[in-house]
Structures are given as structure tokens and as C-alpha cells.
Image (cartoon, coloured by chain):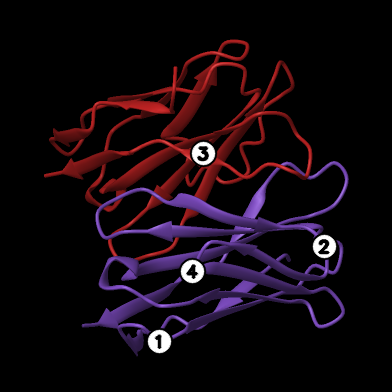
């Protein structure tokens, strides 16, 4: 069974610090990975995608992928109170798979 | 449309009544998904449509749940004889084409409350 595991948190960081969110996945055939942000009472919003080993940067966000370790992470630099949300990690398996497998999410609180 | 549109945004229904939830995906998105999210919980897959292929119904929790989609257009999720445990936010998502490069775009959801 394909699984995506995340620490549920809450993860608390002070404003301006780096928040590090981690995710592991069980299906070694997974090829694409996505991070979603979900504010309380809102629907998930796609913020990052990564397909290749290494780092991918977009503004204050950096996604990291290590397929050998089956590990994905999201770093948020200069964390702001507006970053406080639940972050969902999702994995898409290889050829022919059309479904994302979601983790249960990590709740992040950025303390002013 | 510009985004995934769901209606109604909120629905309160009495136990035992049937409800119908609607999803209008982004134009051109061939894949459509329904998820359920109970309060404080993760996303629970319900059903997946891809073009004219047979839908993947493996996540539907009981035969009280059904969904339809005509081609690549609107989808409706129907819950018959609603129960209190059906109370949740029902999220619809769509995706352009079934390749690895695209994540889902979610709608704003329908919050269903069964009283």
C-alpha cells in the first residue's frame, strides 16, 4: 500500500526563522512530488512540485527530493505568520498512475 | 472557468435525506477527483474520473455514495440517506492530463452538515 508519512506537528518556529517540513514515502516507483498549503477552513493550494533529485527553489520556498532515501522536504525561509497553515505532502507514482497519495499534513505555526 | 467551481459551498441537511454536490472542473482538465475531509483529518479519496474511461470508485465508503461525470465536464457526487458521519468538507480537484508533471487544483469545497 502506498503511503506518505508526515509528522503531524504542530511545528512552531519564530518569525524570520527557517521552517523545515519533512515527508517520507513508501512507493519507490513514485516520480513526482507536491507540497500543498491548507489554511484552516480552506482547500489545499499547490505551492511546489519537484520531480528530480536535488533542490528546487521558488521565492522563500525550497523543495528537496532524495529518491534513494524516499524523502521529500520543504524549507520555508524567513517564515512569516501568514505561513501558519497545514502543509500536505503528496506523491504521484510512475507510469499509468493518476492519483496523488497525500500525507496527513504537518501543522506549522509561525510565532510573531 | 478560471478555477474549479463547487456548489453549494455549504449544505445543511437532515439525516436520511439525499444530497447532490456539484463540481465544475477547469476547462480542458481531463481528470477529476472527489475527496472528503472530516474536521481535523486528512484527505480521503472517494472517486476519480479520467476522460471517458471507467471511473475508479475504490474510495467510495458505501453504496450510498455515487458520482457521475459526462465527458470532461461537470461532475455530481450524490449521497443517499445521509448519516451524521457523512458530515465533512467534500473537495473536488481537477488535473490537466494524466502525466506526472501536474498536481491537482482543488475547488473551495462543499461543507456538508447532517443534522
- Determine the CA span between mark 2 and mark 1: 26 Å
- Determine the CA span between mark 4 and mark 3: 18 Å
Q: Secondary structure at mark 4?
A: loop
Q: Residue A107: x percent and y percent?
A: 37, 75
Q: What residue sits right under mark 1 in the picture? A: A17
User: On the rendered structure, is B66 left or right of B83?
Assistant: right
Q: Which residue is pictured at 33% across the width and 57% down the height?
A: B38
The chain letter corresponding to red is B
Q: Nearer the viewer, mark 3 or mark 2?
A: 2
Q: Nearer the viewer, mark 1 or mark 3?
A: 1
- The tag on residue B105 is 3
Location of residue B81 (image quadrant): top left
Q: What residue sits right under mark 2 in the picture? A: A52
Q: Residue B3: x percent and y percent?
A: 43, 27
The answer to whether mark 1 and mark 4 are in CB contact below 8 A is no
- Determine the CA span between mark 1 and mark 3: 29 Å
Q: What residue sits right under mark 4 in the picture? A: A104
| Crowding at mark 3 (Cα within 10 Å: few <14, some 14-19, many 20+) | many
- Determine the CA span between mark 1 and mark 4: 24 Å
- Determine the CA span between mark 3 and mark 2: 21 Å
Does B32 sit above or below residue B1?
A: below
Name the chain letter of the residue that bears numbered label 2: A
Amino acid at each position: 500500500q502506498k503511503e506518505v508519512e508526515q509528522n503531524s506537528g504542530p511545528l512552531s518556529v519564530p518569525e524570520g526563522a527557517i521552517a523545515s517540513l519533512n515527508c517520507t514515502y513508501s512507493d519507490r516507483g513514485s516520480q513526482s512530488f507536491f507540497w500543498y498549503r491548507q489554511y484552516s477552513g480552506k482547500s489545499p493550494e499547490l505551492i511546489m512540485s519537484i520531480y528530480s533529485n536535488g533542490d528546487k527553489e521558488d521565492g522563500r520556498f525550497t523543495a528537496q527530493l532524495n529518491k534513494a532515501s524516499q524523502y521529500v522536504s520543504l524549507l520555508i525561509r524567513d517564515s512569516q505568520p501568514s505561513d501558519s497553515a497545514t502543509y500536505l505532502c503528496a506523491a504521484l507514482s510512475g507510469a499509468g498512475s493518476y492519483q496523488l497519495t497525500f500525507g496527513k499534513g504537518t501543522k506549522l505555526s509561525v510565532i510573531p | 472557468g478560471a478555477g474549479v467551481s463547487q456548489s453549494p459551498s455549504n449544505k445543511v441537511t437532515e439525516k436520511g435525506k439525499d444530497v447532490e454536490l456539484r463540481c465544475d472542473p477547469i476547462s480542458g482538465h481531463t481528470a477529476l477527483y472527489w475527496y472528503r475531509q472530516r474536521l481535523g483529518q486528512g484527505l480521503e479519496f472517494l472517486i476519480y474520473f479520467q476522460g471517458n474511461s471507467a471511473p475508479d470508485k475504490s474510495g467510495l465508503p458505501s453504496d450510498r455514495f455515487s458520482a457521475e461525470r459526462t465527458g470532461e465536464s461537470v461532475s455530481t457526487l450524490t449521497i443517499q440517506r445521509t448519516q451524521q458521519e457523512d458530515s465533512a468538507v467534500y473537495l473536488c480537484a481537477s488535473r490537466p492530463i494524466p502525466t506526472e508533471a501536474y498536481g491537482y487544483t482543488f475547488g473551495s469545497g462543499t461543507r456538508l452538515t447532517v443534522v
